[in-house]
Amino acid sequence: MTAPPLPREVNRAFGALPTPIGKRLLQVRALIFATAAAYEEVGRLTETLKWGEPAYLTDETGSGSTIRLGRVKDSAHAAILFNCKTTLIDSFRERFPDRFEYRQTRAVLLPVVGKLPSRELSVCLSLALTYHLDRRARKAR
């Protein structure tokens, strides 16, 4: 599945980023939509802005935690931001301790050059997109 056309305000947010960061995050955006499409229980994503940054929500099903794309202070890396009250970054660190640079409990930082680590990143994105499903399943046990 290809990513849908960019909503105007989201396109503006990508355009406001430094070009290398914007290009890298557009690659991540495509991967978010491709990953979501692989999980029927995720449903259709809502693409909007949160705090002025592109954000991806599972409004239709409530299956996941919000994913935002942007940057963090004092870094030239592209950032994938997650809700800091989740255990997502801990899960990513456990699975990929040396693959990504992490910022506290809120971000995965990606270099803007080189090949996108799509396989590992899609694992992280799938964990975020199904975060609430996984938590509900654990509570039901």
Image: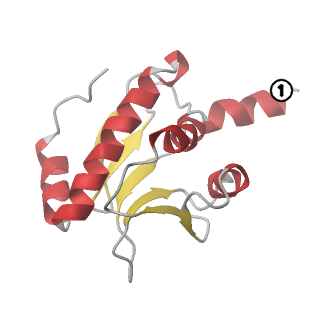
| Image coordinates for residue 52, horizontal then vertical, percent | 26, 61
Viewer-nearest residue: 49 or 129: 129
Depicted 69 relative to depicted 40: above or below: below
Left or right placement of residue 13 versus residue 82 in this view: left
What residue sits 69% from the left and 53% below the top?
87
Badge 1 density bin: few <14, some 14–19, many ≥20, Cα 10 Å = few
| Image coordinates for residue 39, horizontal then vertical, percent | 52, 21
Query: In the orientation shown, which residue stands out farthest toward the bottom?
Result: 74
How many numbered circles does the render carry? 1
Left or right placement of residue 39 versus residue 110 in this view: right
| Image coordinates for residue 138, horizontal then vertical, percent | 81, 33
In which quadrant of the rendered view does residue 37 lie?
top left
Query: In the orientation shown, which residue stands out farthest toward the front?
Result: 114
Query: In the orientation shown, which residue stands out farthest toward the right?
Result: 141
In which quadrant of the rendered view does residue 28 lie?
top left
Badge 1 marks a residue whose secondary structure is helix
Instruction: Name the kind of residue labelled 1 in the image.
Output: Ala
Query: In the orientation shown, which residue stands out farthest toward the top?
Result: 40
What residue sits 70% from the left and 33% below the top?
134
What residue sits 50% from the left and 44% below the top?
121
What residue sits 16% from the left and 63% below the top?
19
- Colouring rule applied to residues: secondary structure
Quarter of the image that includes the C terminus? top right
Viewer-nearest residue: 28 or 81: 28
| Image coordinates for residue 67, horizontal then vertical, percent | 44, 48
Depicted 120 relative to depicted 89: above or below: above
List the residue tagged with mark 1: 140
Viewer-nearest residue: 126 or 140: 126
Quarter of the image that includes the N terminus? top left
Left or right placement of residue 84 versus residue 135 in this view: left
